[in-house]
Image (cartoon, rainbow, N blue to C red):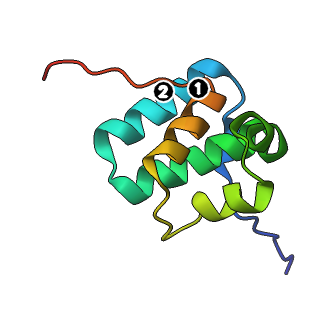
Amino acid sequence: MTTKEVTKFDIAEYLDDDAMIAEYLNTVLEEGDTEDIIAALGHVAKARGMTRIAEETGLSRPSLYKALSHGSKPQFDTILKVLRAVGGNLNIHSA
């Protein structure tokens, strides 16, 4: 009997272009809760490179990891900095 190696799924590996990232973030913003949105920003930051995002936001890498970790409650300012650093923007549309 052969054994198979199972690897953990990492969505950051599939967020390889701007269109995919935008679609992912928009879907999470429409359907997710606060924790989902924070996690999604973490996935996108990882896909773009945490060091680069840390430099662009002015946050240290450890602070960035902490702000985007499960159960964290980052300040809105931090969320906006990360969103802008990954190329995102907030827009309001009427329902």
Name the residue type under label 2: Glu
- The residue under label 1 is 20
- Taking the image as drawn, is residue 9 in sight? no
Q: Is residue 69 left or right of residue 36?
A: right
Q: Is residue 2 left or right of residue 38?
A: right
Q: Which of 58 and 68 is in front in this view?
A: 58
Residue 26 at x, y percent in the picture: 41, 30
Any mark on residue 23, and which?
Answer: 2
Q: Do the residues labelled 2 and 1 touch (CB within 8 Å)?
A: yes
User: Which residue is depicted at the point 69% across and 23% down?
Assistant: 17
| Count of marks placed on residues | 2
Secondary structure beneath label 1: helix
Q: In this view, does 83 lie to the left or right of 30?
A: right
Residue 56 at x, y percent in the picture: 74, 33
- Taking the image as drawn, is residue 83 in sight? yes
Quadrant of the image containing the N terminus: bottom right
Secondary structure beneath label 2: helix
Q: Nearer the viewer, residue 46 or 7?
A: 46
Name the residue type under label 1: Met
